Amino acid sequence: MTAFQPALTTEDLRRNLAAIRARIDAACARSGRDPQEVRLLPVSKTVEVERLRLAYAAGVREMGENKVQEAHGKWQAMREAMPDLRWCLIGHLQTNKAKFVAEFASEFHALDSLRVAQALDTRLQALGRSLDVLVQVNTSGEASKFGLEPAEVVPFVQALPAFGALKVRGLMTLAMHTTEEARVRRCFVLLRQLRERLQQETAYGGAIAQLSMGMSGDFEWAVEEGSTTVRVGQAIFGARALPDSHYWPEGSAPA
Ligand SMILES: *Cc1c(COP(=O)(O)O)cnc(C)c1O
């Protein structure tokens, strides 16, 4: 794994963001895609508020966070000075924390149960809010990963119109934890194929357009396979101090 240098100034962050954007654009050129179809979502978990302010100064207007409480605390600390900052929850959610997500999040990328859908919908309806959601799929077959099995995805999405406050936008995945390119790409291809099935077989049709896939170690492959949102943390902010097992179940940390 590459050693990601810590970004400590607005200039560092600007440079890292521009370098990643250039690599996304190059991956688009290689695969005949329009770069405007691909969003770079900075992942700010473990990064302290002080450095998030620098990221804001570098032009960042949305942050991806894995843990609800950490994200909620940052939102509270930053909402007054930076009201246009959007928060995207990208990690597994327990139903008892749905009320926090409903309060402040703009997007949720890890929907994988009807119980969570119900809990979010109830809280959102009470607040008069809606939420863009992506359904997380376990494309790697690794037992420790969160997300639905591929065969469960179509019936699951067919049940989601019952939750009116959830705007279903697409699918999300974490690729297999390996440096073997072919096996990583297979995860991304599977997610793209599932999107096609959802477009044909559910009431959402073309509204299911987003594929949230690709991280610091594999985002170029993801873009070449059709990603519309890459979630990149360490290549922007620097290596995290905490091991990835803090964020994913033991043994399932992506490369
Ligand atoms: C941390 C995280 C990322 C970003 O990983 P990096 O290696 O920092 O790029 C992407 N997706 C999810 C769900 C994460 O928790």
Image: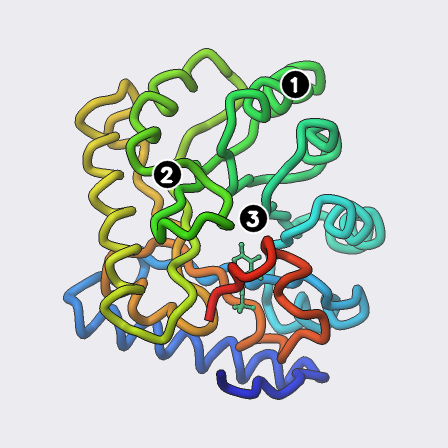
Of the residues tagged 2 and 1, which is closer to the observer?
2
Q: Nearer the viewer, mark 3 or mark 1?
A: 3
Identify the disc placed on residue 90: 3
Find out whether the residues at labels 3 and 2 contact each other: C-beta distance under 8 Å: no
Mark 2 or 1 closer to N-term?
A: 1
Within-10-Å neighbours for mark 1: few <14, some 14–19, many 20+:
few
Q: Which residue is mark 2?
A: 170
- Residue type at numbered disc 3: Ile
Callout 3 environment at 10 Å: few (<14), some (14 to 19), or many (20+)?
many
Disc 1 residue type (three-letter): Gly
Q: Out of 143 and 175, give the one closest to the viewer.
A: 143
**x and y percentages locating residue 118 in the rendered image:** 58, 18
Image vertical order of residue 23 relative to residue 99, above or below: below
Task: Give the residue type at disc 2.
Answer: Gly
Q: Is residue 120 left or right of residue 81?
A: left
Task: Name the residue rendered at 37%, 38% in the picture.
Answer: 170
Q: Which mark is residue 128?
A: 1
Give the class, few, some or many, for how many residues have Cα within 10 Å of label 2's Cα (few <14, many ≥20).
many
Q: Secondary structure at mark 2?
A: strand
